[in-house]
Image (cartoon, helix red, strand yellow):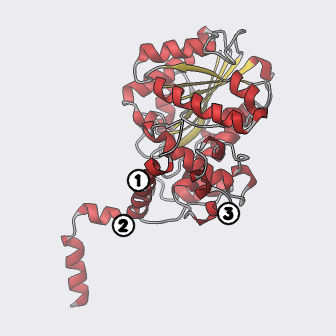
């Protein structure tokens, strides 16, 4: 009778209830996604908690943000969850379990005084390995992809362009001499400049890099604005380290951006990245991404290759590494003149 009641209860429960207890990020076409990504990167996997635990942790983080920034002179907004992700990156960057995840406290130094101590060492170790560990997977992947893409380059003729950079600090972790630029919405860039000014006050040695970082603004879902922003950073302008001489190799980083764009806008943006780099004189483009590619709902490398081919990019299939989460597709694609 117990078995009968249990079976009846399962049938009677709504589909949403059953989904809440599913493991997050398990895709029918590749059920081992999390294990494969963790093993390949050598990074501990997040907890295999049900979806409701992940959702509760995310909501909890969002609810405390207003308090954490209540006395913050920079008063940044959480546009496209940039602020929430900054805190997650600070947690991962302050943990000492894996040297590759430590960022020297860079993300931490963007955060407000006093309240940021809740994610300082060793308090950062008290946070369960959920969202910050998932973000750590894509951070480790992109760091490795960018390093590999630039391995044989003359850095003076290369350029790193973060498209939809948010509050990321990757430009401060790459090698000296590499020109870096970031593109995002006008209000995000204004907030980022305020946070970087705080970083420079805390780290005077970082002032030169802060001043050298170029910015361009635009709504990346609007093709004309995306093209204008790309031209600005690739051909000079935007302040800081624009492109006074044409870069031979443009390395784009796209992290958790396309998930916010309509599919057709996402494809148009990828194509514009290649077209504008080529028009600016580049002979090579590398796209390092941790995002959700348009038209690729699960983890199909063939679908990813087809989407990227429409943007004149060739997927390096050996680089294809799906992971759980919204920004589930990680890989590298290239264009060569």
Q: Which mark is residue 172?
A: none
Give the image location of residue 286, x and y in percent: 64, 27
Q: CA distance from mark 2 to mark 1?
A: 23 Å
**Residue 261, quarter of picture:** top left
The image shows residue 302, relative to residue 231, as above or below, that is below
Q: Give the CA distance from mark 2 to mark 3.
A: 31 Å
Q: Is residue 175 in view?
A: yes
Q: Earlier in the sequence, mark 2 or mark 1?
A: 2
- Mark 2 = which residue? 21
Which residue corresponds to mark 1? 63
Residue 291 drawn at (x, y percent) = 50, 39
In this view, the residue farthest toward the bottom is 1
Residue 246 in the image: above or below residue 97: above
Question: Which residue appears at 43% of the width and 38% of the height?
Answer: 80
Q: Which badge, 2 or 3, comes first in the chain's sequence?
A: 2
Q: Earlier in the sequence, mark 1 or mark 3?
A: 1
* Residues at discs 1 and 3 in contact (Cβ within 8 Å): no
Q: Secondary structure at mark 2?
A: loop
Residue at x 32% of width, y 62% of height: 19
Q: Nearer the viewer, residue 262 or 36?
A: 262
Residue plotted at (52% across, 59% down): 130
Q: Quadrant of the N terminus?
A: bottom left
């Amino acid at each position: 009778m117990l078995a009968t009641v249990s079976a009846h209860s399962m049938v009677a429960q709504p589909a949403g209830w059953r989904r809440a207890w599913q493991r997050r990020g398990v895709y029918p076409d590749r059920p081992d996604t999390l294990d494969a990504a963790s093993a390949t990167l050598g990074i501990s996997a997040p907890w295999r908690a049900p979806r409701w635990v992940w959702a509760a942790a995310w909501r909890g983080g969002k609810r405390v943000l207003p308090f954490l920034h209540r006395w913050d002179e920079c008063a940044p907004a959480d546009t496209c969850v940039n602020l929430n992700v900054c805190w997650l990156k600070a947690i991962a960057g302050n943990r000492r379990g894996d040297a590759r995840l430590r960022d020297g406290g860079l993300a931490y130094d963007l955060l407000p005084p006093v309240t940021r101590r809740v994610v300082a060492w060793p308090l950062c170790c008290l946070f369960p390995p959920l969202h910050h560990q998932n973000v750590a997977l894509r951070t480790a992947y992109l760091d490795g992809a960018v390093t590999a893409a630039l391995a044989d380059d003359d850095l003076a003729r290369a350029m790193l362009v973060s498209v939809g950079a948010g509050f990321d600090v990757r430009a401060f972790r790459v090698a000296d001499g590499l020109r870096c630029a970031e593109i995002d919405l006008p209000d995000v860039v204004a907030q980022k400049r305020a946070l970087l000014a705080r970083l420079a006050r805390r780290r005077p040695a970082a002032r030169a890099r802060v001043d050298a970082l170029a910015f361009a603004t635009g709504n990346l879902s609007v093709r004309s604005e995306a093209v204008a922003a790309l031209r600005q950073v690739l051909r000079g302008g935007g302040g800081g380290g624009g492109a006074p001489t044409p870069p031979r190799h443009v390395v784009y980083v796209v992290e958790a951006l396309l998930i916010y764009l309509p599919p057709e806008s996402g494809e148009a943006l990828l194509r514009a990245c290649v077209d504008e780099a080529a028009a600016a004189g580049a002979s090579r483009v590398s796209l390092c991404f941790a995002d959700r590619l348009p038209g690729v709902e699960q983890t199909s490398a063939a679908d990813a290759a087809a989407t990227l081919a429409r943007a004149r990019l060739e997927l390096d299939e050996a680089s294809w590494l799906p992971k759980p989460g919204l920004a589930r597709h990680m890989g590298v694609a290239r264009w060569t003149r």
